[in-house]
Image: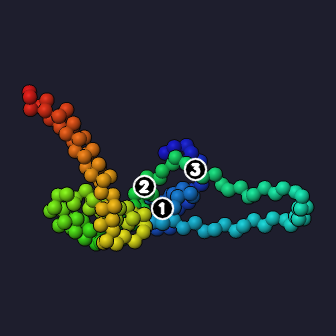
Amino acid sequence: MSEDRQDQGKRKCPNCGAEVLATDDICMNCGAELVVSPSPEPVEPATPAAPSYAVTQPPREEPVETGKIRVVQALVLSWRGFISHIALLVLGALVMSLMGVCVVLIPPLMAGLYAMSLSAVRGQEPELGDIFGGFSYTVPAYAVVIVMAVIFLVINLLLVAPLVAA
């Protein structure tokens, strides 16, 4: 555990009793959501109103931590979003598979299925019709398929061809 994580305040998960950081939103042990009870606002003594010519400073916001990703928290939230719409996502995959008999439809349908899955993970409500939204990304979807095919070909040429030649 890093020093900055050790220095932060800790509390216990109400679900499993594991020790968690005071800033965590999810228990890293059981995945339960941790609700932070709001602390009472400190009462400030009354101050006289500033004269009209005074420049007042806007309230400072707490700095946002950038560059820190809580991987376990992101995975737990993503999994919850995925599982909550599992039947619809499986149905979307089935529709894509059935319509994928026509090979030229696979890239846009796959893009639609990815968009549908992404909206589920983000906590939005996906719809079965979202799978056809991939047709608005037909050119990028085909570009991705071509790039993947080239990468696959290069890997095969570099790794498999020497084995066959030996």
Task: Please tell me which residue lies in front, 45 or 86.
Answer: 86
Q: Position of residue 11 (x, y in %)?
A: 56, 60
Q: Secondary structure at mark 3?
A: loop
Mark nearer the viewer, 3 or 2: 3
Residue at 38% across, 66% down: 120
Q: Quadrant of residue 3?
A: top right
Mark 3 vs 2, N-terminal side: 3
Asked if marks 1 and 2 touch (Cβ < 8 Å), the reply is yes
Mark 1 crowdedness (10 Å alpha carbons): few <14, some 14-19, many ≥20: many
Task: Please tell me which residue lies in front, 157 or 134.
Answer: 134
Q: Where 66 sits versus 53, above or below?
A: above
Mark 3 crowdedness (10 Å alpha carbons): few <14, some 14-19, many ≥20: few
Mark 1 vs 3, N-terminal side: 1
Give the total of numbered labels: 3
Residue at 66% across, 66% down: 39
Q: Position of residue 57 (x, y in %)?
A: 78, 55
The three-letter amino acid code for the residue at tag 3 is Glu
Mark 2 crowdedness (10 Å alpha carbons): few <14, some 14-19, many ≥20: some
Mark 1 vs 2, N-terminal side: 1
Query: On the rendered structure, is 13 left or right of 50?
Result: left
- Residue bearing mark 1: 26
Q: Secondary structure at mark 1?
A: loop
- Residue bearing mark 3: 65
**Marks 3 and 2, how far apart in space?**
17 Å
- Residue bearing mark 2: 72
Residue at 25% across, 49% down: 145
Task: Please tell me which residue lies in front, 12 or 25.
Answer: 25
Q: Is residue 81 visible?
A: yes
Q: Quadrant of residue 9?
A: bottom right
